[in-house]
Amino acid sequence: MGEAPAREDGTVTRSAEYVGSFLVDDCCLDDQMKQLHTQLKYLKACERSRPVTLKFSLKGVKMYDEDEMTLLMAHALRRVSLSTARPIDAQFAFVSHNPGSTDAQLYCHVFKARHARAVRNLFTFT
């Protein structure tokens, strides 16, 4: 996972593989975490992923295509309800509400790094 130093505006850029997203039940935090880790275990064998660039700032998280030309996803920090990591599988995920959505549905967005240390670095920014 590529690591660029923080820019003057505090934005931190990281490379990752986008694995995908799935719906998260609106339940208590303990049950959500169990659901997330069950899904992450299942998705660790997923061979389909897409190289992306993640940009973290105090405003939120943005996902761009690999060359940073096309914005694919953006989530304001206030929409992110939790994040988690499975360093053993080099996975990182965050749960958020979709922007502009009128429903309260939550989605988990899953990413894979090259190694566990890179996941720990990602996890510290959310």
Image (cartoon, helix red, strand yellow):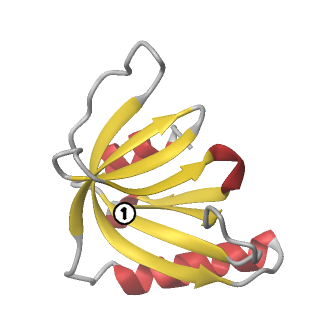
Q: Position of residue 104 (x, y in %)?
A: 77, 75
Answer with left or right where residue 76 lies relative to residue 115: right
Q: How many marks?
A: 1
Looking at numbered disc 1 in the image, what kind of residue is underneath it? Phe
Q: Residue at x 34, y 67 (%)?
A: 89
Q: Position of residue 46 (x, y in %)?
A: 27, 83
Identity of the residue furthest to the left in this view: 67
On the rendered structure, is 114 left or right of 88? left
Find the residue positioned furthest to the right.
Answer: 28
- Report the front residue among 91 and 94: 94
**Residue at the image point whose x is 65% and y is 64% from the top:** 100
- The residue located at (21%, 54%) in the rendering is 114
Classify residue 77 by image quadrant: top right
- Nearest to the observer: residue 5 or residue 123: 5
As drawn, the residue found furthest toward the top would be 8
Q: Residues within 10 Å of mark 1 (few under 14, many from 20)?
A: many
Per the image, label 1 sits on a secondary structure element best described as strand
**x and y percentages locating residue 29 in the rendered image:** 78, 70
Q: Position of residue 4 (x, y in %)?
A: 26, 28
Q: What residue did someone put label 1 on? A: 111
Task: Tell me: residue 23, above or below residue 68.
Answer: below
Q: Which quadrant, please, contains the C terminus? A: top right
Whether 71 is drawn above or below 106: the answer is above
In percent of the image, x 26 and y 55: which residue is there?
52
| Horizontal arrangement in the rendering, residue 82 relative to residue 31 (left or right) | left
Rendered image quadrant of residue 11: top left
